[in-house]
Amino acid sequence: MSKVRELLFYTLLMAPLLMLVLLFEMVPLFGLLFKSFQLDESGQFGVGNYVTAFTGKFYLKSISNSLWISFVSSLVGIVIALFGVNALYRTHNRWVKGFFLRILNMTSNFAGIPLAFAFMILLGNSGFLVLLGKTAGIGTLGDFQLYSSSGMIINYIYFQIPLACLLMFPTFDAIKKEYIEASILLNAKGLNFWRYIGLPIILPGILGTFSILFANAIAAYATAYALLGSNFPLLPVRISAMFIGDVVQRPGMGSALSMILLSIMTVLIVFNAFILKKMHKV
C-alpha cells in the first residue's frame, strides 16, 4: 500500500510538468504533424508537401545548405576545441583553468542577433577589420565578404567553439594519469599516444559532442536571419518564411519542413544517446 501511495504522491508532484509537456510540446507536435499532410492550395491531405520539399530545388538547397554549414562548423569547432581543451586540461594552475572556464561559459551564450551585429561591426562592408585591411593593403581581410556563405560559416564556428570546449572538457577525465605514465614508459609519446590511447578513449565523447554541435547549428535561426535575412536559403529561415511570409503564408509546407528538421534532430538525439550508452559501458 505504501508503494501505491508513494507512486500517487510522485505522480501528483509531476502533474504540472506533465501538463506543460502535453500542452506546450505534444499537442503542438501532433498539430504540426497533422498540418504537414495538408496541402495549402486545396486543403486536401496527402504527401505533396513532402514531395515538394524533396524535389523542389529551392527547398533542397535550404536543406543542403543547413546540413553543410552545420557539418563544417561542427567539425572545425570540435577540432579547435580538442586542442584548446587539451591545453586547458594540462594546466595545473587552478586560477587559469577557472578563468578560462568562466570565459567559455560567457561566450557560449553569446550568439544570435548580438553575435551577428558584433561581426557586422568587425567584418561588415564598413567594419573595423575590413577598413583596417583596406588601409594596410591586406587584400584577404579588406575584400572579406561577411554577407556570404563563408561569412555565415565563420559566425557559426564562433558560437560552436565555446560550446564544444565545455562539452569536451569532462571527456578528458577519461584519460587517467596512469595511462600517460604507462605510455611514457612504453615510449608511446606525442602522436603515438593520441593515436593508440588518447583518441580511442575520448572518441565516444567526440562523436557525442559532434552530434550536439550539429543539432545546435542546424536549428540556429537568429544569427542567420540577422546576418542575411531570407536571402540565403537555410532550413530554419525557410520554415519561418512559410509561417510569417509578407506575401503568401504556407503553413502546410512550413509544417512539412519543420517535421524534416525535427526528424534530423531526432536522429542526432538518438545517436547521442547511443554514444552516451557506449561511454558508460567503457
Image (tube, rainbow, N blue to C red):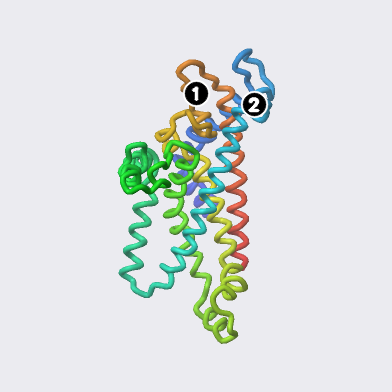
The C terminus - image quarter: bottom right
Residue at label 1?
Answer: 243
On the question of residue 13 being in view, the answer is no
Q: Position of residue 180 (x, y in %)?
A: 53, 79
Residue at label 2?
Answer: 56
Residue at (42, 39) in percent of width and height: 146
Tell me if residue 274 comes above or below residue 42 in the rendering.
Answer: below
Tag count: 2
- Residue at the top extreme, as displayed: 42
The amino acid beneath tag 1 is Phe
Q: Depth-wise, is mark 2 or mark 1 nearer the camera?
A: 2
Q: Where is residue 251 in the image (x, y as percent from the top left)?
A: 54, 22
**Dot 1 surroundings within 10 Å: few (below 14), some, or many (20 or more)?**
some
Residue 252, picture quadrant: top right
Tell me if residue 71 comes above or below residue 237 in the rendering.
Answer: below
Which element type, helix, strand or loop, lies under badge 2?
A: loop
Q: Is residue 126 left or right of residue 46?
A: left
**Dot 2 surroundings within 10 Å: few (below 14), some, or many (20 or more)?**
few
The amino acid beneath tag 2 is Gly
